[in-house]
Image: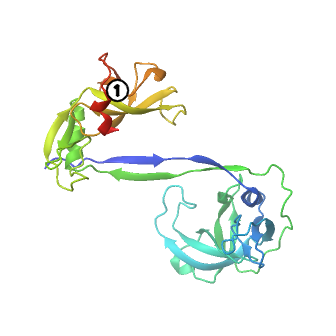
């Protein structure tokens, strides 16, 4: 039996978002070791604050300070912390209703073990040594035996308010291709592009999927396609991607390889970005020891007629 292929993959999309007056005040307050909630028309105090009442949909703007102490309403033990979580040692995820609040805040509780955690226990905020105006300014919660901590009396007037944050979205996982894609990857190592033909509709899928998503039947008939193909549609990229050493603007296109029943995507090079067009005939360019084409370049052939690729758009 051949070795099972696998590789670590990361999908990451950090993005910048602006803050409204309520969220701005909340994060600015955390930077100053002040916890702010927002008061509703019926007198409830919501922490974390929201801009609209989840019950009435009324716009909210009346800020109210709550204490950095509170009560655990429910919890779950995390025995194996992951990258990016608040603590590197085992801890409890807790919902804490801060003194003066009517809703609970989700965060980490630093405790020696699950036997030390219980619903109803008293806790307080452990502030991060360096604070920047983010929820991570609360390093975690810790056990506490006292009553409500005194308030600072500050709900506004902080200098240099936080007006935006960078929200990081990241997924780490291990990918293992099946039979069909393993053959496709092995073919690329020999600079060949292999697809599989559906025995029912006869469409050739590249990359192969092991089954036809239209007919629902297995695909085992291997077909070599390309290497040349036709640009069916494309986009001009004007924003430089992180860790991608390609100068903008550049073109990414859907390319229908000769003999394939659908288009795959690839970068177009060897031609000014504003000269790329639908129907352009292209061929792959391989760099030394590459596992897949670096980009596609024009072949010099006449453009393909629209009717020859219109079903592949």
Where disc 1 sits, the SS reads loop
Q: Is residue 292 left or right of residue 15?
A: left
Q: Is residue 93 above or below residue 277?
A: below
For this rendering, which residue is in front, 101 or 84? 101
Residue at x-position 35% and y-position 38%: 313
- Examine the rendered structure and indicate whether residue 182 appears above or below residue 120: above
The residue at 61%/80% (across/down) is 73
Residue at the front extreme of this rendering: 307
Between residues 218 and 295, which one lies in front from this camera angle?
Answer: 218
Quarter occupied by residue 282 = top left
Q: Say few, some or many: other residues with alpha carbon within 10 Å of mark 1 (under 14 / 14 to 19 / 20 or more).
A: many
Q: Position of residue 115 (x, y in %)?
A: 52, 80
Q: Label 1: which residue? A: 279
Whether residue 190 is visible, yes or no, is: yes
**Image point (52%, 64%), residue name:** 89
Residue 85 at what x, y percent from top left?
Answer: 54, 59
Q: Is residue 256 above or below residue 284?
A: below
Q: Position of residue 117 (x, y in %)?
A: 57, 79
Quadrant in the rendering for residue 72: bottom right
Q: Which residue occupies 51% across, 35% down?
A: 241
- Residue 28 horizontal side relative to residue 92, left or right: right
């Amino acid at each position: 039996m051949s070795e099972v292929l696998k590789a670590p993959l990361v999908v990451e999309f950090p993005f910048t978002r602006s803050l409204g007056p309520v969220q701005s005040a909340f994060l600015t307050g955390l930077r100053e070791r002040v916890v702010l909630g927002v008061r509703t028309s019926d007198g409830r105090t919501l922490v974390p604050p929201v801009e609209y009442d989840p019950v009435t949909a009324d716009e909210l703007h009346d800020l109210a300070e709550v204490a950095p102490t509170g009560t655990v309403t429910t919890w779950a033990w995390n025995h194996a912390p992951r990258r990016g979580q608040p603590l590197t040692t085992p801890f409890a995820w807790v919902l804490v209703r801060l003194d003066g609040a009517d809703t609970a805040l989700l965060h980490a509780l630093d405790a020696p073990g699950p036997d030390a955690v219980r619903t109803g226990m008293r806790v307080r905020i452990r502030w991060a040594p360096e604070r920047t105006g983010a929820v991570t300014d609360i390093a975690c919660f810790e056990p506490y035996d006292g009553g409500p901590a005194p308030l600072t009396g500050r709900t506004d007037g902080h200098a240099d308010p936080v007006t935006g944050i960078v929200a990081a979205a990241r997924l780490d996982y291990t990918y293992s291709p099946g039979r069909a894609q393993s053959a496709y990857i092995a073919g690329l190592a020999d600079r060949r592009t292999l697809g599989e033909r559906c025995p029912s509709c006869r469409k050739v899928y590249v990359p192969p999927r092991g089954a036809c998503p239209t007919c629902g039947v297995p695909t085992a008939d291997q077909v070599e396609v390309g290497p040349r193909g036709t640009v069916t549609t494309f986009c001009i990229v004007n924003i430089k991607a992180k860790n991608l050493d390609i100068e903008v603007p550049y073109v990414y296109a859907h390319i229908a390889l000769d003999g394939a029943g659908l288009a795959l995507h690839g970068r177009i090079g060897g031609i000014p970005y504003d000269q790329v067009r639908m129907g352009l005939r292209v061929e792959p360019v391989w760099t030394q020891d590459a596992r897949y084409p670096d980009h596609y370049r024009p072949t010099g052939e006449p453009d393909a007629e629209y009717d020859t690729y219109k079903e592949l758009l």
